[in-house]
Image (cartoon, rainbow, N blue to C red):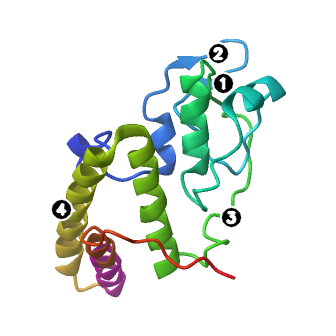
Amino acid sequence: MPRRWRGSGLGRTAAGALASPRHRDPATGALEVPYVKGACLLTTREVWQRTGPLDERFFLYFEETDWCHRARAGGGRVYLCPDVQVRHLEGQATGQVSEFSLRQFQHSYRLYLRKHQGEAAVRCVRRAQAFEYRWKAWWRGRSRRPADRALAARYRAIARLQDMDDVAPDRPR
């Protein structure tokens, strides 16, 4: 992604939460961040009761982002402890990057945006992602390397999802 686009909201990366740490606790080294991944989320009972449980409308993606957003809105703070390591087997629950995981990610992302920023934000992000992923597909598709061509096909699939109003996949049984 071009450097000037980083931080624009186009795409969600694992490092996204670290893009602009607000505060580093000098005693612990913990960084105040907008959200942390849900693979390891620790909180006090008081904050949990004030914020409430994870929103069950989210499935696999954005439930922790939503919870952190609500905790911060209620006066809480979210910290990342860089010295703590947790092994997150990302992709294991969805079978790596499948059609299901692509659709579920988009569905949860739209739900999150709609809940916290409104329908106009969803439309804007869909247009931006359609442009972003079509451009990436075009760029990678020019290569002769099989890995680049495979990535171009994945990008085209993500771009096509932006043309669909309902991307929710059927949940696995």
Q: Earlier in the sequence, mark 3 or mark 2?
A: 2
Residue 25's tag is: 2
Question: Which residue in the structure is indicated by mark 1?
Answer: 30
Question: How far across and down, in percent of the image, does residue 154 sit?
Answer: 35, 78
Q: Is residue 133 above or below residue 31?
A: below
Residue type at mark 4 is: Phe
Instruction: Select label 4 or label 3 by which is in front.
Output: 4
Give residue 89's mark.
Answer: 3
Q: Quadrant of the N terminus?
A: bottom left
Sequence-first disc among 3 and 1: 1
Q: Position of residue 65 (x, y in %)?
A: 55, 43
Q: Disc 2 marks which amino acid?
A: Asp
Magenta residues span 146-156
Q: CA distance from mark 3 to mark 1?
A: 23 Å
Callouts 3 and 1 close, C-beta under 8 Å: no
Q: Is residue 149 magenta?
A: yes
Q: CA distance from mark 4 to mark 3?
A: 30 Å
